[in-house]
Amino acid sequence: MRPGSARRNTVDIDTELRLVEGLQAGDATALEALMERYSSRLYRLAYGITRSSRDAEEVLQDVFLTVFRKIGSFEGRATLGTWLYRVTTNAALNRRRGLAARAEGALDDQLPTFLPDGQRAGDCSFLLADWSGTPEDELLAGEARNAVNRALAGLPDGYRAVLVLRDVDELSSEETADVLRESVPSVKSRLHRARMALRESITRSLAPRHATA
C-alpha cells in the first residue's frame, strides 16, 4: 500500500458516509456535493455505453434523480461509488435497449476467424500494414479517433459496458463484477473478447491507409 493511501481511503469513506446521511435526510446540498464529486465520472461512463452526449446527459439526470429518491434503499453492502456506477450502467443500458432500429451485430461477427490448420481465414492483406512510422498524435486524432469511436459503437452493449468500466474508468475486475453483478471470470472473458473485437475493427479500418506497397 502506498504511503498515505490508507488515510485517503478513510477520508473517502467518511465523506461518502456523510453524503449518504445527508441524502437520506433529504438535504439538497448533499445532492449538490454528490453531483460535484461524481458527475464527470458518471457522465464518462454513460457516454462510453450510449455513445451519445445527449443520451449520456439524460442518463446522468436520471441517475441523480434515482439516487435522491432511492437513497433509502442503499444498505451499504457496496461502496457509494460502486452503487452509483451500477445505477448509471443500468440506466445507460436500459436507454440503449429502448432505442428503436439500432440493432448491433453479434460479437462473433467482429472477431477474427481461423482455419483448421490455424491460418487466419479471409483477406489478410491488412495485417501487412506498417504502423511503426506512424506518429502517435496521428493515431490518436482524425480518422484514427473516428475508427475507435466506430469500433466502440459496434460492440454489443454488454461488452462495451465491461470495456468502459475496465479500460476507461479503470475499475478492477472485482469492482466491475460487483457493478454488473456478474462473476469475475465472466467479466474477464467478456473483456478479452471485447478487446479482441475492438482491435480487429480498428485494424481493419485503419490498415489500408498505412499498408506498405
Image (cartoon, rainbow, N blue to C red):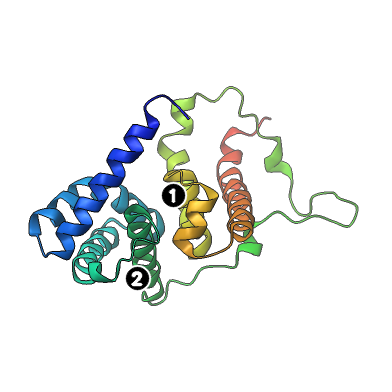
Q: Which residue is mark 1?
A: 149
175 vs 87: above or below = above
Q: Residue at x 48, y 59 (%)?
A: 178
Residue 151 makes an appearance in the image: no
11 vs 87: above or below = above
Figure label count: 2
Q: Residue at x 24, y 65 (%)?
A: 67
Q: Which residue is mark 2?
A: 95
Residue 85 makes an appearance in the image: yes
Q: Position of residue 62 (x, y in %)?
A: 23, 67
Judge depth for marks 1 and 2 and give the one in front. 2
Q: CA distance from mark 1 to mark 2?
A: 19 Å
Q: Which mark is residue 32?
A: none
User: What's the residue type where badge 1 is placed?
Assistant: Asn
Mark 1 is surrounded, within 10 Å at the Cα level, by few (under 14), some (14 to 19) or many (20 or more) other residues, namely some
Q: Residue at x 33, y 66 (%)?
A: 75
Q: Position of residue 140 (x, y in %)?
A: 44, 34
Q: Residue at x 48, y 32 (%)?
A: 139
Is 3 on the left-hand or right-hand side of 112?
A: left
- Name the foreground residue: 138 vs 15: 15
User: What's the residue type where badge 2 is placed?
Assistant: Arg
Q: Secondary structure at mark 1?
A: helix
Is 152 on the left-hand or right-hand side of 70?
A: right
Q: Position of residue 146 (x, y in %)?
A: 43, 45
Q: Position of residue 24 (x, y in %)?
A: 18, 64
Quadrant location, the C terminus:
top right
209 vs 180: above or below = above
Q: Secondary structure at mark 2?
A: helix
